[in-house]
Image (cartoon, grey):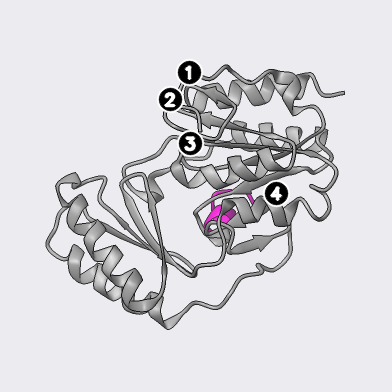
Amino acid sequence: MSDSCLPPPPPALLTGAALFVDFDGTLAPIADTPDGVMVDDDLLALLGHLGDRLEGRLAIVSGRSVATLRDFGFGEFLLAGTHGLEFAEPGRPVVAPARLPAIDEAEAAFQTFAAGKSGILVERKTISVGLHFRGAPQWGREAGDLATKLADQFGLALQPGKMLYELRPGGADKGSAVRALMQRAPMAGGIPIFIGDDVTDEEGFAAARDLGGAGILVGPTRPTLAAFSLEQVAAVRHYLAQGMAGID
């Protein structure tokens, strides 16, 4: 795992790619609240054109639920949501496990913890629940302790993120999503390239590398399995546009 300065990815890397892209912090800046993220028409148009150039080999892989990704306008793309637990093709029903009663119990405990604490936010997802403390970092340790306790109590997977703890069923991650999607059309036959910013994207980087491709880290240098890096969201858009221009 490298923590040295990584080179920028060459635009030619996208030629023949099966492209997997994270959402928050990669395609759009992270907002103070989950519903504060903005997706503009230019981004959707860019991804649409790029997907066409790649013959459909473009997937959004996110911790967000498929339902939320569709609400943001990504319904025309192949989607893997909730860290690889949900999948959906354009215009098709979501394939996902049922919501566990344990998630509802964990959500209730999160709500109790958040009561009276300004800046603490509970995010209900389709089959998981998140506890955000970006607006109140002083509660981060207590939030982590609670999430760890609930994960152990209910047998749930604990997924740390950027100023976030999420509880969800186990058995999947962004790496397993990449591996599953690479086994079928339209991704099969492409070279897997995964672009993401968070520690939750490391499994995606590893899967892309193991399958003959590479990962691209977005944001500050840190220990990572990615081979390349881009500084910020704006650089991701610029890179995707450059790469698209070079695809025959």
Q: Residue furthest front?
A: 1
- Which element type, helix, strand or loop, lies under badge 4? loop
- Is the residue under label 4 in contact with that under label 2 (CB below 8 Å)? no
- Residue at the image position 33 percent from the left and 72 percent from the top: 152
The one of 56 and 82 positioned closer to us in this rendering: 82
Q: CA distance from mark 3 to mark 1?
A: 15 Å
Q: Nearer the viewer, residue 57 or 190?
A: 190
As measured in the structure, the alpha-carbon distance from the residue carrying label 1 to the one carrying label 2 is 6 Å
- In the displayed structure, does residue 56 sit left or right of residue 128? right
Residue 215, image x and y in percent?
61, 34
Q: Quadrant of residue 210?
A: top right
Q: Amino acid at mark 2?
A: Thr
- Is residue 119 visible to the viewer in this orientation of the structure? no
Distance between mark 2 and mark 4 Cα atoms: 29 Å
User: Contact (CB < 8 A) between labels 1 and 2?
Assistant: yes
At a point 21% along the width and 50% down the height, the residue shown is: 140
Where is mark 4, residue-wise? 77
Q: Which residue is mark 3?
A: 197
Q: Specify the segment rendered in magenta.
A: 68-75
Which residue was labeled with disc 1? 5
Residue closer to the observer: 168 or 94: 168
Which of pointers 3 and 1 lies earlier in the amino acid sequence?
1
The C terminus, quarter of image: top right
Query: As shown in the figure, which amino acid type bears the numbered disc 3?
Result: Asp
Q: Amino acid at mark 1?
A: Cys
* Mark 4 touches mark 3? (CB < 8 Å): no
Nearer the observer: mark 2 or 3; the answer is 2
Q: Earlier in the sequence, mark 4 or mark 3?
A: 4
Tell me the residue that label 2 is attached to.
221
Mark 4: few/some/many CA within 10 Å (<14, 14-19, 20+): many
**Residue 186 versus residue 152 in the image, above or below:** above
Residue 133: give x, y in percent of width and height: 25, 50
